[in-house]
Amino acid sequence: MSNLQTQLPTDTWIYASWQEYEQAIANLLNEKGKSYYYKGHMRLEMAPVSFDHGKDHVVIIFAVTLFAALKSIAATGLDTTTFRKTGVQDCQPDVAYYLRERAQAIPAGTGIVNLDRYPAPDLVIEIAKTYLLDDLGTKRSLYEELGIAEYWVVDVQNAEIIAYAIADQGSKRIQESHVLPGLAMSILEEALRQSREMSQSEVVTWLLSQFQQKKG
C-alpha cells in the first residue's frame, strides 16, 4: 500500500480545503488514480481499473466517435482529463467530448483544462463499475454546476447507460442524446451487451451497420 493511501481515506468524499486538495493530488502524481473536488470536499479514487470497466470505456469511445464521424459532427474526445475551476471545483471524468464549434476550443499543449478560461465539455461520461451511486449523485451535481450539456453514466454491471440532459444547473433523464441527435442509448447498451460475447472490432462493425441504417 502506498504512503498516500495510508495517510488519506480514498474512494470517499472528505472535507478539505483547496490547499489540502492540491497537496493530495501532488502526492497522487506517482499513483494511478483520479481526483475530484466539490463543495469543500475532495475524493481520491485509487481502486484499480477492472477488465470490464476498461472494455466498456473503449467501446463507448469507439461508438461516440464513429457516430459523430458518420454524422459529420466535429468531435474531440478526451480520456481522463482534468477540468478545473481553481479553488472551487476539480474533476477527471473517464471520457469527455467537445462537439461542433467547440471541437477545437482547447489548444494543443494544454495541460489541465482551466474552466475559468475555456468552455466545459459538451458531453461527460463516467464508467461506473464500483462507484455507481456516487456517479449518479454527487458527481452529477458537480457536472450540473460546471455547465456540462450532457452526462452519461455507464453501469458496467448491467450494461445500462443512464443519461441526463443538463440545463440551468439541473438535469433530466433522456433516452436519446441531445448533443448527438439520433444516438439512442438503447443502441449503445446493445453494443455493450454484444461486447461481452464478441471482439470490439466486431462490435464496431455492428455499430457501423446500425448507424448507417439509421442514416438511410
Image: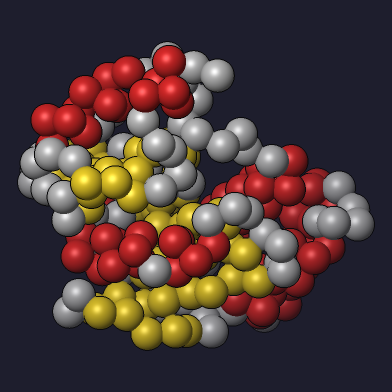
* On-image quarter of the C terminus: bottom right
The residue depicted at 47 percent of the width and 57 percent of the height is 125
The one nearer the camera, 82 or 176, is: 82
Instruction: Tell whether 137 sits left or right of 59.
Output: left
Could you tell me which quadrant the N terminus lies in?
Answer: top right
Above or below, 199 against 190 in this view is: above
Residue 7 in percent (x, y) is at 37, 24
Q: Could you tell me how many numbered marks the image carries? A: 0
**Residue 117 appears at what percent x and percent y?**
9, 43
Give the color scheme: rainbow, by chain, secondary structure or one colour. Answer: secondary structure
Q: Percent from the top left, x then y, of residue 57?
A: 61, 48
Relative side of 91 to 188, left or right: left
Query: Does residue 210 appear left or right of residue 22 in this picture?
Result: right
- Is residue 121 in view? yes
Tell me if 216 is positioned left or right of 40 in this view.
right
Residue located 48% across and 74% down the image? 163
User: Which residue lies at the image location 19% right of the left edge and 41% below the top edge?
Assistant: 16
- Give x and y (percent) for residue 178: 40, 78
Q: Nearer the viewer, residue 173 or 47?
A: 47
Residue lying furthest front in this view? 6
Report which quarter residue 203 is drawn in.
bottom right
Q: Residue at x 40, y 36 (%)?
A: 9
Q: Nearer the viewer, residue 153 or 108?
A: 153
Is any part of residue 91 visible from this angle?
Answer: no
17 up-or-down from 182: above or below: above
